[in-house]
């Protein structure tokens, strides 16, 4: 079974790399930072399994690992060496030098789609999921109506086809039927996709509601009459600042441990004071009562009482010592108002029984293996949220703003920071004009001043906040917040931080599949406009090359984002957006824009680097060890064909002159690669070896079917001339591999000799399969 293979591969990797715990740092600033010890760039790729884990640097177990800056010794160093050369070239590096290499042997991939689905909705609040569900439901109704209409048209044409005797009319009707069948199939697939997505959202909401219902049922084990009396309306009172703050923290900061709870309450109380009554003794010489307390009925003219106060307030004699004073059994005292810090009162309460927990109906409960503060009756939290938003809106907004001013997003506690993100979104909804890009810039500046080791986690949190603002339908600036924020961060001072945020935002959006495509597209379109900006060139000249590296930085960002997408299995979603960067087919190569150049080179370089740097030990372990194949695990043929169409048409993208467009980019980089089609032929050949492996056994049927689908797309998209050149390259490789096997026999390297002998055998098998599929295509036409 595939899942069992994954598990075995994981164990094998752990044993072979016991001293290394690599993280998937595809977003590192430099490629050579991709070692396991690297702390750079974790922001872009940290895989998380629950919302509370976001922000904590973790090492995912389901992604490519064992990455190094060196190409493993596969004996291919002088075969298509230009592939390695192109992977280290940045087309916008003005000095023409290579940027540093870095990605390694990779995988350790465990189950793919399962992990994607597991984390798909974890950052998305219930109300937004509900909005998406409703939106999809309307789309399903529209698609269903459209599908039924197409089927009716097809049925009508079928009847006409059967009734007519005219052959020409039959041919015309047949073409119409085939066209409508194709359209109806596309609508059906989209309909099924939307129904599946809607069902998943429904399941997620049901799962969350089940958890709430469980808590609700538990709460009803208490006295129902007591629950009826206790509510936010009866508990929240104007004259109890501390209690009200405790209610606010318990409501808006669920899941805090006792220490964090006490600390957050204390922070919100800081600077606030309260007037409290204090009993002060009164003596006969107290001028406040005419020098005699006895002049006042019951001991004085104010709120005076009588109590036993030994040794308090006793006047000194002339010698400055206590006189031989005979205490009365009852000493008069006055109740006076004294101002006291609320934080002081809050701190003093810790030395006494937990009066605030009891008074505010809170308790300590064990959740997810830790002790947290929560309401004794779980429904009180929802009750307080509704009460704050409907009946105490001014108090609520003031508390939200006070929370924002504390910068709890940067707090050392992950639980506090998680809740701070939720509160920040609420605050932005209530005051959108006060909480736009300026506010985010202030947070980023504070993050920039932090220790570099802390920056990754803090940037991750800020990215999550921006993501939440982008998907929040009630936020006034949701559609533009990310772009306006990023517009302010182009200067070199903050560019590295901004690009880390971009990588993470793209990850968050594309992780949700179609739901996040538009937001990710908006961010990438912003990058494209920046890359192609003519003003950017002028600024470079006017400000002494202040922005001279920005285009190079953008390309590095795109390259690292592509690697990240391969590790997180949304590479085809990213390519779906980036293919818009390819030039129009009638554009002269001399007029290719910077984004055209980047688009043409990215995938070609990615294929070269991933092919050369995959370690031999992963060959034959399953097609899912290679990042361009891994996302296709378990996908229907229609989806596989669609993704392979993107891959093949991109690699074979034609120029205005009819040859490959990427050829002109390689010429610009002065890479010795006269015919990139030969390199593409090498990619395909090596991918076949990756799937088959070096053992004398046929791979699983699913893997061969997948590769046959790839070959079919090549046959459909490539011209006859291109197909011939590709097969000729395979013939050349057969001869080169023979030379290699002889070379390694002479050097005594029996392992590599054996592998090149098997490579030759597999190339012959590849040519055989390709020829058979070509014949199949001819017969079908």
Image (cartoon, helix red, strand yellow):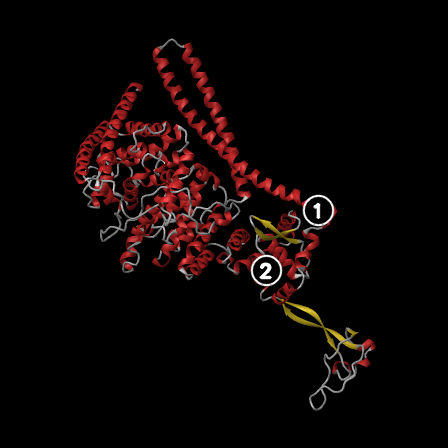
Residue 562 spot, x, y in % from top left:
35, 43
* Contact, mark 1 vs mark 2 (Cβ under 8 Å): no
The 10 Å Cα crowd at callout 2, few under 14, some 14 to 19, many 20 or more, is some
Q: Is residue 176 visible?
A: yes
Image location of residue 86, percent across then percent down: 24, 44
Q: Which of 723 and 737 lies nearest the eye of the viewer?
A: 737
Query: Is residue 353 placed above or below 377 in the rendered structure?
Result: below
In the image, 536: left or right of 521? Answer: left
Could you give the CA–CA distance between mark 1 and mark 2, rounded to whole angstroms? 26 Å
Quadrant of the image occupied by residue 692: top left
Residue located at (22% from left, 51% from top): 96
Asked if one can make out residue 652 in the rendered structure from this viewpoint, the answer is no
Q: Which residue is mark 1?
A: 222
Residue drawn 49% across the image and 58% down it? 412
Q: Residues within 10 Å of mark 1 (few under 14, many from 20)?
A: few
Camera-nearest residue between 706 and 120: 706
The percent coordinates of residue 545 (x first, y second) are: 27, 58
Mark 2 residue element: helix
- On the image, the x and y values in percent for residue 332 come to 78, 77
The secondary structure type at the circle numbered 1 is: loop
State whether residue 263 is above or below residue 597.
below
Quarter of the image that includes the C terminus: top left
Query: What residue do we see at 56% from left, 49% from top?
Result: 369
Q: Residue furthest right?
A: 297
Total marks shown come to 2
**Which quarter of the rendered picture does the N terminus lie within?**
top left
Task: Please tell me which of labels 1 and 2 falls first in the chain.
Answer: 1
Q: Which residue is mark 2?
A: 262
- Quarter of the image for residue 211 reads top right
Most foreground residue, 331 or 380 = 331
């Amino acid at each position: 079974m595939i899942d069992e293979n994954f598990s075995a591969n994981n164990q094998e990797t752990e044993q072979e790399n016991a001293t290394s715990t690599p993280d998937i740092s595809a977003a590192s600033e430099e490629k050579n930072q991709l070692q396991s010890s690297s702390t750079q760039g974790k922001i872009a790729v940290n895989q998380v399994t629950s919302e509370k884990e976001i922000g904590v640097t973790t090492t995912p177990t389901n992604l490519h690992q064992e990455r190094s800056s060196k190409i493993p010794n596969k004996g291919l160093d002088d075969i298509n060496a230009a592939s390695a050369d192109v992977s280290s070239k940045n087309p916008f590096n003005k000095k023409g030098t290579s940027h540093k290499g870095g990605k390694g042997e990779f995988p350790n991939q465990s189950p793919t789609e399962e992990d994607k689905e597991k984390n798909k909705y974890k950052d998305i609040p219930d109300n937004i999921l509900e909005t998406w569900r409703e939106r999809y439901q309307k789309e399903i109704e529209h698609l269903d109506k459209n599908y039924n209409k197409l089927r009716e048209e097809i049925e009508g044409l079928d009847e006409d086809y059967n009734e007519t005797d005219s052959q020409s009319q039959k041919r015309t009707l047949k073409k119409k039927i085939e066209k409508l069948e194709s359209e109806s199939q596309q609508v059906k697939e989209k309909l099924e996709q939307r129904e599946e997505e809607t069902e998943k959202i429904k399941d997620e909401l049901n799962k969350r509601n089940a958890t709430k219902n469980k808590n609700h049922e538990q709460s009803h084990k208490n006295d129902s009459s007591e629950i009826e009396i206790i509510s936010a309306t009866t508990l929240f009172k104007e004259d109890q600042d501390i209690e009200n703050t405790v209610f606010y923290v318990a409501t808006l900061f669920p899941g805090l441990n006792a220490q964090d709870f006490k600390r957050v309450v204390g922070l919100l109380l800081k600077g606030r004071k309260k007037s409290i009554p204090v009993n002060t003794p009164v003596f006969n010489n107290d001028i406040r009562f005419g020098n005699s307390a006895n002049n006042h009925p019951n001991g004085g003219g104010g709120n005076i009482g009588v109590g036993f106060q030994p040794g308090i307030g006793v006047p000194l004699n002339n010698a400055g010592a206590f006189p031989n004073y005979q205490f009365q059994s009852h000493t008069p005292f006055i109740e006076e108002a004294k101002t006291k810090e609320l934080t002081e009162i809050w701190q003093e309460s810790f030395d006494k029984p937990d009066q605030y927990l009891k008074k505010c109906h809170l308790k300590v409960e064990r959740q997810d293996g830790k002790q947290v503060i929560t309401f004794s009756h779980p429904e009180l939290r929802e009750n307080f949220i509704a009460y704050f938003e409907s009946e105490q809106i001014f108090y609520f907004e003031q508390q939200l703003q006070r929370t924002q001013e504390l910068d709890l997003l940067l707090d050392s506690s992950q639980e506090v920071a998680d809740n701070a993100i939720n509160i920040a979104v609420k605050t932005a909804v209530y005051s959108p004009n006060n909480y736009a890009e300026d506010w985010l810039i202030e947070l980023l500046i504070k993050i920039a001043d932090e220790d570099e080791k802390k920056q990754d986690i803090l940037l991750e949190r800020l990215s999550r906040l921006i993501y939440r603002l982008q998907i929040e339908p009630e936020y006034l600036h949701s559609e533009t917040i990310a772009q306006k924020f990023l517009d302010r961060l182009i200067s070199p001072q903050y560019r590295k931080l901004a690009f880390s945020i971009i990588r993470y935002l793209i990850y968050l959006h594309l992780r949700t599949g179609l739901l996040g495509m538009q937001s990710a597209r908006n961010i990438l379109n912003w990058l494209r406009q920046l890359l192609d900006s003519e003003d950017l060139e002028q600024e470079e000249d006017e400000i002494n090359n202040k922005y001279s590296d920005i285009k190079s930085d953008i390309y590095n960002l795109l390259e690292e984002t592509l690697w990240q997408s391969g590790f997180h299995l949304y590479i085809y979603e990213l390519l779906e957006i980036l293919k818009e960067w390819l030039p129009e087919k009638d554009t002269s190569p001399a007029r290719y824009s910077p984004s055209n150049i980047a688009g043409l080179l990215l995938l070609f370089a990615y294929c070269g680097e991933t092919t050369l740097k995959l370690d031999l030990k992963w060959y034959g372990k399953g097609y899912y060890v290679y990042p361009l194949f891994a996302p296709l695990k378990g996908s229907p043929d229609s989806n596989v064909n669609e993704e392979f169409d993107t891959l093949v048409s991109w690699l074979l993208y034609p120029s205005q002159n009819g040859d490959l467009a990427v050829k002109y980019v390689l010429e610009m980089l002065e890479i010795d690669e006269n015919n990139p089609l030969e390199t593409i032929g090498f990619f395909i050949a090596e991918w076949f070896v990756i799937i088959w492996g070096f053992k004398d056994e046929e791979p699983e049927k699913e893997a061969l079917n997948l590769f046959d689908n790839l070959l079919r797309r090549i046959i459909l998209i490539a011209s006859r001339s291109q197909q011939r050149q590709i097969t000729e390259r395979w013939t050349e490789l057969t001869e080169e591999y023979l030379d290699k096997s002889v070379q390694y026999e002479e050097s005594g390297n029996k392992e590599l000799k054996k592998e090149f002998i098997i490579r030759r055998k597999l190339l012959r098998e590849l040519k055989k399969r390709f020829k058979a599929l070509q014949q199949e295509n001819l017969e079908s036409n």
